[in-house]
């Protein structure tokens, strides 16, 4: 029997979370129900990605060369897994057949763990190793072949969304990129090379040319803008991680920002959670964020009003469907554990082919 360190929780309307049953190993993949694509670390230290069912059965597991981060649906049964920054691989995974194809990153840039698709192109957030500047890798959606590299006007670009026109005052569809602002180097892992200045921002980019259409920053340069979710109202919620020099300032800093046509602002009711939001999802009511270091999850409306909080040890991975939110948290009382990673995705049932 294999147990999960960050157990799987199901939430309904008001973050009423209930403990999941242990995970059991199973080989075949069912397509007649909603499942989760997730990544985890084994007790041996090895990393895997695979499919979990809502009943917590592991339907599929694939070995990975290093720790993963972002997970994204490509089309049909195919998904993309990207290495955690500074990363050097992308993995295409077919969740029905288990087939994989890996692409290695060029040595002059490292991957930052997230991606998006628009038209025939796949975009990956990356960092130029020589200059430390953030860029988007523009790739062919099917082959992953690199076509171009576009600067993001910031450091450490992290998550990216493809947004429709008439959002944030922009008429046409565009890419929204969160520049985390932290300078790192591939030879030094995730170590920060300098504390000041950080270069964190959110940029809107033309998905055809790479032109920057708009850029937003916060007065507090020590807040790293990282993960994002779009609410149905057009408001973008942004999960942040604080990097202040003083621990007290860092732990008291807000971890949620909202972006709309009026600009970018922090949410005052998201403070005092140790300065770290791991993930974010949008619900009809607003947003849910996981506050990993504070062992909690918090629910806000679309205007930033705090609705409720819930204890959840080492909370991180989130997925949402309507008012239901799936939250990964740590359950450290078990032995021989496997550790769920930062993100997971809901997999919709496959439709039969006519």
Image (tube, helix red, strand yellow):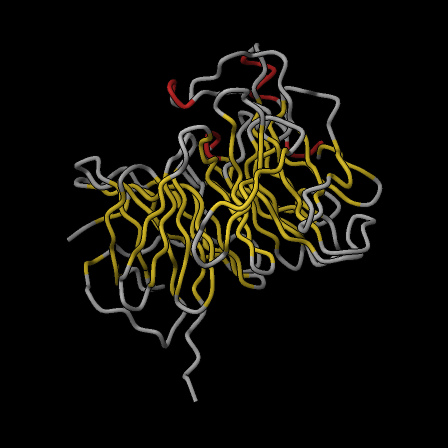
Q: Nearer the viewer, residue 176 or 292?
A: 176
Kindly identify the residue that appears in the image at 58 percent across and 30 percent down: 134
Quadrant housing the C terminus: bottom left
Q: In the image, 343: left or right of 135? A: left
Residue 130, x across and y down, in percent = 50, 20
Determine the image quadrant of residue 117.
bottom right
Q: Nearer the viewer, residue 325 or 239?
A: 239
Residue 260, x across and y down, in percent = 78, 45
Determine the image quadrant of residue 214.
top right
Kindly identify the residue that appears in the image at 48 percent across and 23 percent down: 129
Residue 339, x across and y down, in percent = 29, 41
Determine the image quadrant of residue 60.
bottom left
Task: Tell me: residue 342, above or below residue 266.
Answer: below
Kindly identify the residue that appears in the image at 31 percent across and 54 percent down: 101
Kindly identify the residue that appears in the image at 72 percent across and 56 percent down: 173
Q: How many marks?
A: 0
Residue 211, x across and y down, in percent = 72, 41
Q: Nearer the viewer, residue 31 or 312?
A: 31
Task: Tell me: residue 229, above or below residue 291.
Answer: below
List the single residue furthest toward the bottom.
Answer: 354
């Amino acid at each position: 029997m294999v147990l999960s360190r960050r157990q799987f929780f199901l939430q309904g309307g008001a973050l009423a979370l209930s403990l999941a049953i242990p995970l059991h190993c199973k080989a075949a993949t069912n397509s007649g129900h909603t499942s989760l694509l997730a990544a985890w670390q084994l007790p041996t230290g090895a990393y895997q990605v695979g499919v979990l069912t809502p009943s917590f059965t592991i339907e599929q597991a694939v070995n990975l060369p290093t720790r993963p981060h972002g997970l994204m649906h490509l089309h049909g049964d195919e998904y993309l897994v990207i290495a955690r920054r500074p990363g050097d691989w992308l993995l295409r995974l077919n969740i029905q057949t288990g087939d994989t194809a890996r692409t290695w990153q060029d040595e002059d840039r490292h991957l930052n763990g997230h991606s998006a698709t628009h038209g025939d192109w796949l975009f990956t957030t990356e960092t130029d190793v020589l200059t430390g500047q953030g860029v988007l890798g523009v790739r062919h959606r099917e082959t992953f072949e690199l076509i171009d590299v576009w600067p993001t006007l910031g450091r450490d670009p992290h998550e990216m969304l493809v947004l429709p026109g008439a959002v944030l005052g922009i008429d046409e569809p565009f890419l929204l990129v969160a520049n985390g602002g932290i300078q790192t180097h591939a030879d030094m892992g995730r170590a920060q090379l300098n504390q000041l200045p950080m270069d964190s921002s959110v940029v809107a980019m033309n998905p055809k040319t790479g032109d920057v259409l708009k850029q937003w920053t916060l007065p507090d340069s020590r807040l790293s803008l990282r993960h994002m979710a779009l609410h149905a109202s057009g408001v973008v919620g942004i999960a942040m991680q604080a990097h202040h020099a003083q621990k007290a300032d860092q732990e008291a800093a807000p971890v949620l920002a909202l972006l709309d046509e009026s600009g970018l602002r922090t949410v005052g009711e998201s403070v005092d959670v140790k300065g770290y939001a791991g993930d974010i999802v949008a619900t009809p009511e607003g947003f849910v964020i996981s506050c990993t270091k504070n062992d909690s999850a918090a629910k806000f409306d679309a205007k930033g009003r705090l609705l409720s909080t819930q204890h959840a040890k080492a909370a991180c991975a989130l997925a949402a469907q309507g008012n239901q939110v799936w939250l990964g948290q740590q359950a450290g009382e078990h032995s021989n554990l496997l550790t769920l990673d930062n993100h997971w995705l809901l997999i919709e049932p496959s439709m039969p082919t006519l």
